[in-house]
Image (spheres, grey):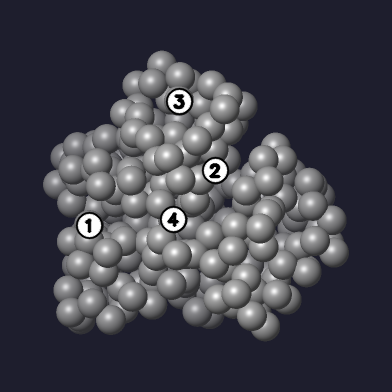
Amino acid sequence: MRLSVVIPAFNEERLLPATLRAVDDSLAPVHAAGWSSEVIVTDNTSTDGAARVASEAGARVVSEPVNMIARARNAGAAAATGDWLGFVDADSSPSPGLMAAMLRSIQSGRCYAGGSTVRLDGGGWAAGAVAAGWNLVRRVTRLPAGSFYFVDATVFRDVGGFPAELYAAEEIELSRRLRRSPLARGRRRVILGSHPLVTSARKVSLYGPGELLGFSLRALLRPRATLQRRESCAIWYDGRR
């Protein structure tokens, strides 16, 4: 068996090295179980040294010329050779414990996809509150966050991957499509909670409550009109780092 870890990167030269080190360390239990692995970084129109950093760290680098998270993840998945795909954001650090828990879920035979709870690195009480709310929603809905998303590669390809028409919340639509695939029948999605993914709190720090709440309300009230427009999803695409 083989696991392909896909990391989309848009101007992530600063945080990507730590992510790649964490991913490399986290793969120890995967290799101990006899699996092989590969790490693929999708350079998504970066103007900094993200691609160079990834290559120097030993990752395979592919390019996606359209600046869009869904397309970047799909480009990495298209190059992947694994039986399972693991998507990790460039500002996140999975642990060996999280990967081991993922592996146990896969080996149970009862899982076709999953994710994890998150812990925001920094950001104070506001970040803690955001993470607590986020984790509650994910546990109740069993909808994995895009920052850590693993999926059976055959089921992923059966539904066509992440929806390329959405600039944000693409992982939610993917989960809906995966659930309808006949290849997922008899299995379930899981949210792993024993080893939360550590991810950057920079959105909480860089954007005020008004901006974050405003986006959330627009996405709830007019989801398609909001999520299909790059301008409406600026907190992912305006380049603030």
Count residues near mark 3 (Cα–Cα under 10 Å), then give few for <14, some for 14-19, many for 20+: many
* Residue drawn at (44%, 34%) of the image: 43
Q: Tag 1: residue type?
A: Ala
Report the quarter where the C terminus lies.
Answer: top right
Marks 1/4: CA–CA distance: 16 Å
Please tell me which of labels 3 and 2 falls first in the chain: 3
* Image vertical order of residue 59 relative to residue 90, above or below: above
Q: Mark 3 highlights which residue?
A: 51
Please tell me which of labels 1 and 3 falls first in the chain: 3
Dot 3 lies on which element? helix
Q: Mark 2 highlights which residue?
A: 92
Q: Nearer the viewer, mark 3 or mark 2?
A: 3
Mark drawn on residue 70: 4
Dot 4 lies on which element? helix
Q: 34 or 51: which is nearer to us?
A: 51
Q: Position of residue 153 (x, y in %)?
A: 22, 57
Mark drawn on residue 91: none
Marks 2/4: CA–CA distance: 17 Å
